[in-house]
Image: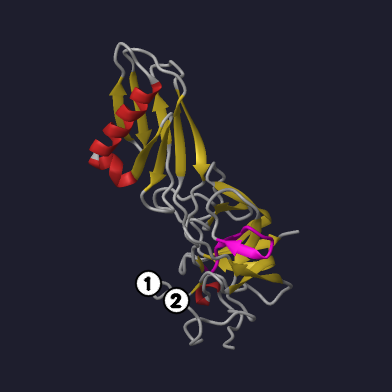
Amino acid sequence: MAQLDVPQNIDEAQAGQQADGGFSDKISVTVEDRVAVAQVVTVTVDSATNDTIYGITVNGVRVTFTSDADATETEIVAGLVAAAVASSFFTALVTATDADPDIVITAQTPGTALTVVLDDETTGDLSQVATTANVTVADNIAFGLAVFEGSAFDLGILPDGAGTVLGISILSDVIPIPRQDPDAQLNAGGEPVYKPTQVAGVMRQGRIHVDPEVTPVLGDGVFARHTATAGTTRGALTNVDDANTQAVPNSRWVRLSAFAGLAVVEISHP
């Protein structure tokens, strides 16, 4: 197994390397493998109101149907489904199936999250329930990123929402160096990553080099980005505490390198 010495200078380091020769506690988890599942939302026409505009908006794309002077639930279901089928923008996102009194909305692409908004002129005639949750395909985990617990305690994932922080993915004395190890796996850009079903090293206590999302303030707490926004990456570490990040337990920023763009995180996860 190829090994990497602990660098003597932060500017010689790589993200995921142990930052010094001090005490560290590392665990091994298997990167969870999963198949993407199409999200399904069931819209129900619970009652009918005459001369009312009914609308369904999916990820910003809206279709409507206006009931007549003798409205029925069946009529509204059929009208909304017909409007959905007639919209190329709508059908690019989802299929809409008539299951009177329900409309079954299914994502065209498994793993694509749907946001469904109903409007019925405040009549309360429409309701919705999430029938099948969206499941995204398993992600690679690059070095120096936050690792969250997957569907079991011994499975790790790149975060895709708030969850349980396991630690930070490592490239250290017990982990092969992908560019030197012929068995290691690279992503499409040729960068070393842990891929689904691989065993990943995760640091829970010690100091580790990471590539911070923004230049942090030394002494600040460390937060893991669990939901990506424009210009950000899931799993990235930052000192920004907002709705899309989560605290990494007992951690702080302890060193910076303006040259390499790296920083050192000290973590003491219980």
Q: Is residue 154 magenta?
A: yes
Q: In the picture provided, is 50 more to the left or to the right than 193?
A: left
Q: Position of residue 64 (x, y in %)?
A: 30, 27
- Name the residue rendered at 52%, 62% in the picture: 34
- Name the residue rendered at 24%, 37% in the picture: 87
- Comparing 12 with 72, the one in front is 72
Identify the element where label 1 is drawn.
loop
- For the residues bearing labels 1 and 2, Cβ distance under 8 angstroms: yes
- The magenta-colored residue range is 142-157
Q: Is residue 210 magenta?
A: no
- Name the residue rendered at 45%, 43% in the picture: 40
Q: Which residue is mark 1?
A: 189
Q: Position of residue 225 (x, y in %)?
A: 53, 52
Q: Is residue 45 above or below residue 251?
A: above
Q: Label 1 sits on what residue type?
A: Gly
Q: In the picture provided, is 30 more to the left or to the right than 81?
A: right
Q: How many marks?
A: 2
- Comparing 91 with 167, the one in front is 91
Identify the element where label 2 is drawn.
loop
**In which image quadrant can residue 43 be found?**
top left
Q: Is residue 265 above or below residue 189?
A: above
